């Protein structure tokens, strides 16, 4: 404790790697146990941890998993299923990892080694830390910040244990041993194949003897490992596919990843494409579905991608896609190209074919790897009103706006804002919703709507600096009017979460709202 108090902030932060909520005695003793209570060795260990934490610390240990990986967390977890779920009888969080179904080639297409390491810093410094802090406030009020790990090796093949995979395990083990010592309460390796004993001998050399003694290895007999899991975890906190009565790991992963999903996302389909000559898959879109496709790859040769509507044979996209880097997998991020988005108007209903054709020689025995991330979005439905009552505007515009606006007339920039220059911050992605009316571009400066709640504090105009103008713009009467009319023009659930306007077939309705508000 005396050494801890005398040292600088980086030293203290390394010791309290989970935050100040961890009690002092337990935080200090984690480090002491890791070095068998040798003070000299503990100080050296913390100093090494400070050095290792320096670079990720500049990024606050990657609180955003998307930025850490360089791709969507749902895409990554789809290729390498892993999750925190429930807690043990003693209150420790449970982490389940399934490297047996890890698609190594697909993982290489979507992220880099550094991205995987960054994601690990996120998992330890943010996810595990927050779960431990929460569990410390709930019965049985665990004092130690630890977790139970379940490593499911079902379907693991010897070909998956590559040099690259072992390198990832080694680096993650070094981070955990040095920066998060004594946080493993117990590890259960289940569904271990026969050849895993050789792999374990290699991995065992990377961890200290005390940590290795906490690892229990089970074969493919579910009765044995489920019985052991139920000794440690209550049935309601254990997933149903591991002998408990909780949600399955698949359902739990889907639930946790839904928080990262884009608004309006209905479903996600991921296809790993190993293209030697040709490769194809189909997508069935419903009536209100909108398609977006992202292609991830490290292929320097590339392949020609096309999207075809099956009913009519129309080619909607046709382009060569390849990696833009030099092929350095250790340092370069993979290339991601969005080939279809909302501006392409790829909407259901219908069946769409996604084709990938190799441009290599027909005699080539090599193949090119791609991951197609298909996002099926739901098209928001804009509501139109047949008539909007007219409200008198400011006295400067009384003559101009005293009559009801004819919604059948073409709307132009000049008719919307005839006097003061104003810009509406337009949400371009909504342009696909308009079948007949093009999105209008209104020049600077700005009227910006950010949410339903702070609708009125966001209004700014060139000429609204006078007390008179401000008093009119903030009047209760006008605020109520705008709130009511915006609720009619667009669905209320869209308003709080979207920076938008304009994108509606009744553009003159919106025009009347803003000319009134401007007055």
Image (spheres, rainbow, N blue to C red):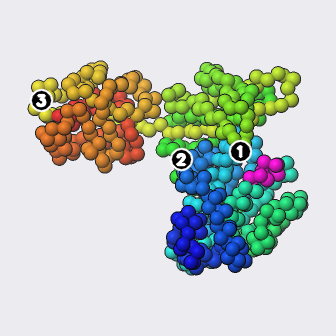
Image: magenta residue range: 160-169
Which residue, given by chain and number where applicable, does mark 2 sit on? Answer: 261
Q: Is residue 207 above or below residue 396?
A: below
- The answer to whether residue 196 is left or right of residue 369 is right
Residues at badges 3 and 2 in contact (C-beta under 8 Å)? no
Q: CA distance from mark 3 to mark 1?
A: 62 Å
Which residue, given by chain and number where applicable, does mark 1 sit on? Answer: 107
Could you tell me what secondary structure mostly forms the magenta stretch? helix
Q: Nearer the viewer, residue 148 or 300?
A: 300
- Residue in view at x 85 percent, y 60 percent: 202
Q: Is residue 390 above or below residue 56?
A: above
Q: Of callouts 2 and 1, which one flags the residue occurring earlier in the amino acid sequence?
A: 1
- The answer to whether residue 304 is left or right of residue 346 is right
Q: Residues within 10 Å of mark 2 (few under 14, many from 20)?
A: some
Q: Of callouts 3 and 2, which one flags the residue occurring earlier in the amino acid sequence?
A: 2
Q: Nearer the viewer, residue 180 or 194?
A: 180
- Residue in view at x 64 percent, y 58 percent: 51
Which residue, given by chain and number where applicable, does mark 3 sit on? Answer: 396
- The answer to whether residue 3 is left or right of residue 442 is right
Q: Secondary structure at mark 3?
A: helix
- The answer to whether residue 28 is left or right of residue 359 is left
> Which percent across, then down, holds residue 519?
17, 34
Q: Residues within 10 Å of mark 1 (few under 14, many from 20)?
A: many
Q: Residues within 10 Å of mark 3 (few under 14, many from 20)?
A: few
- Residue in view at x 40 percent, y 42 percent: 498
Q: How many marks?
A: 3
Q: Is residue 93 above or below residue 464?
A: below
């Amino acid at each position: 404790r005396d050494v801890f108090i005398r040292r600088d902030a980086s030293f203290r932060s390394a010791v309290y790697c989970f935050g100040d909520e961890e009690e002092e005695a337990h935080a200090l003793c984690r480090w002491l146990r890791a070095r068998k209570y040798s003070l000299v060795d503990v100080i050296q260990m913390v100093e090494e941890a400070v050095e290792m934490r320096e670079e990720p610390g500049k990024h606050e240990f990657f609180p955003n998993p998307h930025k850490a990986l360089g791709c969507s967390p749902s895409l990554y977890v789809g290729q390498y299923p892993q999750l925190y779920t429930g807690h043990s009888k003693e209150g420790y969080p449970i982490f389940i990892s399934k490297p047996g179904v890890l698609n190594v080639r697909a993982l290489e297409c979507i992220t880099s080694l550094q991205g995987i390491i960054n994601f690990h810093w996120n998992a330890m410094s943010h996810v595990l830390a927050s779960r431990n802090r929460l569990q410390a406030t709930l019965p049985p009020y665990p004092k130690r910040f630890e977790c139970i790990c379940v490593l499911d090796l079902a379907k693991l093949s010897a070909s998956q244990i590559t040099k690259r995979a072992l390198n990832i395990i080694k680096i993650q083990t070094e981070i955990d041993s040095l920066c998060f010592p004594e946080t493993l309460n117990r590890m259960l390796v289940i569904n271990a194949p026969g050849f895993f004993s050789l792999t374990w001998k290699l991995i065992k050399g990377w961890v200290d003897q005390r940590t290795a003694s906490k690892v229990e290895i089970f074969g493919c007999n579910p009765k044995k490992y489920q019985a052991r899991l139920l000794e440690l975890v209550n049935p309601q906190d254990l997933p149903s596919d591991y002998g408990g009565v909780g949600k399955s790991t698949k359902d739990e992963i889907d639930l946790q990843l839904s928080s990262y999903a884009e608004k309006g996302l209905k479903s996600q389909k991921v296809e790993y494409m190993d293209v030697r000559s040709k490769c194809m898959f189909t997508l069935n879109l419903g009536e209100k579905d909108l398609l977006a496709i992202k292609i991830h790859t490290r292929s320097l040769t590339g392949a020609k991608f096309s999207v075809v509507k099956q009913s009519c044979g129309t080619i909607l996209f046709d382009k060569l896609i390849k990696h833009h880097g030099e092929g350095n997998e250790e340092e370069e991020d993979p290339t991601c190209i969005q080939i279809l988005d909302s501006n392409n108007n790829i909407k259901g209903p219908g069946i769409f074919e996604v084709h990938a054709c190799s441009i290599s020689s027909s005699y080539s025995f090599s193949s090119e790897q791609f991951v197609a991330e298909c996002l099926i979005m739901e098209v928001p439905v804009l509501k139109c009103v047949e008539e909007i009552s007219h409200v008198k505007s400011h006295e400067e515009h009384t003559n101009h706006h005293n009559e009801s606006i004819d919604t059948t007339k073409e709307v132009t920039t000049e008719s919307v804002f005839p006097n003061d220059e104003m810009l509406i911050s337009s949400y371009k992605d909504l342009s696909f919703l308009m079948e007949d009316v093009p999105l209008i571009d209104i020049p600077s400066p700005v009227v910006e709507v950010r949410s339903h709640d702070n609708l009125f504090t966001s209004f700014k105009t060139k000429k609204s600096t006078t007390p008179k103008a401000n008093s009119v713009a903030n009047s209760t009467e006008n605020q109520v009017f705008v709130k009511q009319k915006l609720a009619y023009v667009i669905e209320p659930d869209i308003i709080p979460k979207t920076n938008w306007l304009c994108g509606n077939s009744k553009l003159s309705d919106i025009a009347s709202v803003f000319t009134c508000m401007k007055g």
